[in-house]
Image (cartoon, rainbow, N blue to C red):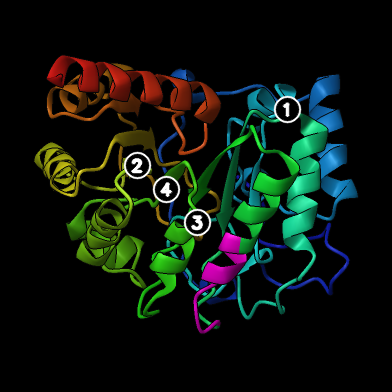
Amino acid sequence: MVTLIDTISERQVRPRHPEKANRPDSVSPPKPDWIRVRAPTSRSYANTRNIVKENGLVTVCEEAGCPNIGECWDKKHATFMIMGDTCTRACAFCNVRTGMPDGLDPDEPAHVALATKKLGLAHVVVTSVDRDDLADGGAEHFARTIRAIRESCPTTTIEILTPDFLRKDGALEVVVAAKPDVFNHNLETVPSRYQSVRPGARYFHSVRLLQRVKEIDPTIFTKSGIMVGLGEERHEVLQVMDDLRSADVDFLTVGQYLQPTLKHHAVMRYVTPEEFKGYEQIAFTKGFLMASASPLTRSSHHAGEDFARLKAAREAKLQSAG
């Protein structure tokens, strides 16, 4: 578990999730051995952390308490989180700080591009907090960041993981026009769990958003992911797969939900590695070009390697069709 109080930030100490502070504790079952990870200690991890801090950047690896941070940062892989560290929504599963965000940093796109260059990234992942306070939800800031990386690192491929831009007309078109290589937007869970897990979002809006990306620019790979262990049924997971394939989504990730604090949604069940393997096999049979399903699978985990496989799968599909 992580603490609800942020004692590291220079800002005044306050609850990280004020909306959850008075909720009763939700106790999860003990973690099984198959999802335990070692604490990060390598020199490469420390070097990555230094580059992130020197450029004043935020990473979802830290903010969301990702269990893969040691492995990824050891390989100099980091997922940059733009538009600050404070989200305007309060999803029941997420450990990112909630509240009213600060204004946008106009220099942030350049800082992300510089860090990408310093880390020597062949593939970079950029995500963000939800910014419902902004007229475009941060779409132009995403586009500026993509363009800055392209200018500084022309051979680097770019993957973005965006919010849903709910009720922000024209926002999606701005981001797609900047031509990321991969457009990722996570559904997070099955429709029946949205009210308790992701109440600020709308399931079919998210599916439609991914479909619109393909309609606007069919060359962009699309990707989405869900967590399991939140009380969903197996048939619901399979229906999500069908919904995503109907939207022509290329890549699916499925990972185990892990409770950040006792104030967050409890883990209802730890899905076994064998069940994850079954989900992955089914996803491929349903037509996804790429699928990754395991207890520690996360949207950005092995993103560079997976992008190479994604391209190869598309090329093989085109050749077989020709």
Q: Is residue 139 magenta?
A: yes
Segment colored magenta: 134-143
- Dividing the picture into quadrants, the one containing residue 169 is bottom left
The residue that label 4 is drawn on is 183
Residue type pointed to by label 2:
Thr
Residue 5: give x, y in percent of width and height.
Answer: 72, 62
* SS for callout 3: loop
Left or right of 25 in this view: 236: left
- The label nearer to you, 1 versus 4, is 4
Q: What residue appears at the point 59 percent right and 49 percent down from the top-left corner?
A: 126
User: Percent x, y for residue 26?
Assistant: 43, 55
| Kind of residue at badge 1 | Lys
Can you say which quadrant of the picture contains the C terminus?
Answer: top left
Q: Residue at x 39, y 52 (%)?
A: 185
Residue 129 picture quarter:
bottom right
Disc nearer the start of the sequence (3/2): 3
Residue 219 badge: 2
89 or 158, nearer to the observer: 158
Against 251, residue 97 (above or below) is: below
Mark 4 or 3: the one toward you:
4
Q: Is 78 left, or right, of 11 in this rendering?
A: left
- Front tag of 2 and 1: 2
| Observer able to see residue 97 | no
Residue linked to disc 1: 76
Disc 3 designates what residue? 94
Mark drawn on residue 211: none
- Name which of mark 2 and mark 4 comes first in the sequence: 4
Q: Which callout, 1 or 4, points at the residue further toward the start of the chain?
A: 1
Left-right relation of 225 to 72: left
Q: CA distance from mark 1 to mark 3?
A: 24 Å
